[in-house]
Image: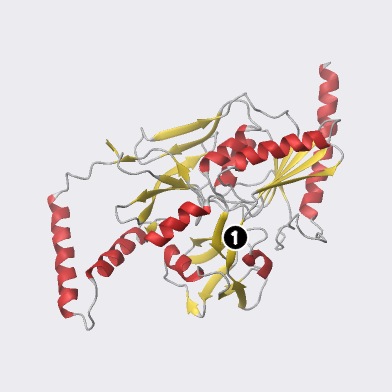
Amino acid sequence: MVKNTKVGWLIILSFVFGIFVGGLCVRNVSALSNKTYEKLKVFTDVLEIIKQNYVEDVKTEDLITGAIEGMLNSLDPYSGYLDPDMYRELQVETKGSFGGLGIEIAIKDGILTVIAPIEDTPAYRAGVKAGDKVLKINEESTKGLSLMECVKRLRGPKGTHVTITIIREGLTQMRDITITRDIIKIQSVKFKTLEKGYGYLRISQFQEKTGADAARALEALQRENPGGLRGLVLDLRNNPGGLLDQAVEVSDLFLDSGVIVSIKGRDAEEKTSFNAHQEGTMPPWPIVVLVNQGSASASEIVTGALQDYGRAVIMGSKTFGKGSVQTIIPMDDRSGIRLTTARYYTPNNRSIHEKGIEPDIPLPTDAKTPPTMNEETPKTDTELDRALEQLKGMSIFQKYLDTEAK
């Protein structure tokens, strides 16, 4: 095994956005078999035949790029090629400001699917919902397109429009949604006091500073409630994921020891574990975590860790089920490839890939997007009401246990 020290690398746990900087091991590819060389000769022969005989003149670099895209797309829905523009945008996106629609997407069961709309973005305001199946983009079918091809069609300059045709559970026919592209600025952490002694922490995406912002929010909630917090609602609904290290940092706020998540590659020795630390751990408040089908990847890491250790009660509906790790490898021409290199596992060694996390307390599926805290007239949030009710019961029980202990 050879260390790749020539370039930096990135691991993403969300589908379009989100990166984690660290180290990457790359297998030695110098010892190619004779059979491989034979296939490479076939490739160069086909390339030459196309160059000489195709009805129109084509650039060699375009043919090679197409071959690279096809090679990566044949592996799984999450591997793909990033041209220099897309690779540059990916690096910018984790800082919380980028151009686009504000949706996370994936190929699920062969269909382009919305993981979740991001709060306070054009897609969110246009009514896009988690679980929507995108059948067309600007009247062109998405069938057979790779994830990267779909991303290219959805992106564009600020102020331009894109129309997606979706089908949604509960709808009897397809629906067109026109969205105006904009610069997306995301505030990943929001908080408020629900009632005296009960806090609410909303994480909409795991970005560069989410862990630190969450810690500051929890400290602010404690100042707002000088009598002490009796419970906390952690809202991860429609959180499509993001940075691995930030998911670990948020989990570490509520756990004082033990493995938070493990990442396992193809080889048995390729295993990395991230552990919790006692320093910086918040008081042991009762916690309810709210999730839904739009909770994916990094948010499933947090949910799985808190569930496995019995640190929180999970309420809502089954999560998306994205448990594979993509490594972003920069190339010499400033492009990059996104390659599935590992799967992650919860502390109890559960792989949730394509399975999701089942809540401890299922709630009736609500097709509505959770209300944003920025709305002037917030909609009724029955799931949050149920979570607060659950917290109150847990607080009373904890108070009883504390009294008995004395």
Which residue is the site of mark 1?
A: 184
**Residue at 49% in and 63% down:** 109
Quadrant of the snapshot with the C terminus: top right
Name the foreground residue: 181 vs 55: 181
Q: Horizontal and vertical percent for residue 139?
A: 51, 80
Q: Relative to residue 121, is residue 292 depicted above or below? A: above
Residue occupying image coordinates x 45% and y 63%: 147
Name which residue lies at 83% across and 61% down. 377
* Front one among 200 and 374: 374
Point out residue 106 in the picture as x, y percentages from the top left corner: 50, 60
Quarter the N terminus occupies: top left
Work out whether residue 221 can be spotted: yes
Disc 1 residue crowd, few under 14, some 14–19, many 20+, Cα 10 Å: many
x and y, in percent, of residue 35 in the image: 15, 54
Q: Residue at x 56, y 37 (%)?
A: 248
Position in image of residue 70 (x %, y %): 32, 64
Of 102 and 172, the residue lying toward us: 102
Q: Is residue 294 left or right of residue 43?
A: right
* Amino acid under disc 1: Ile
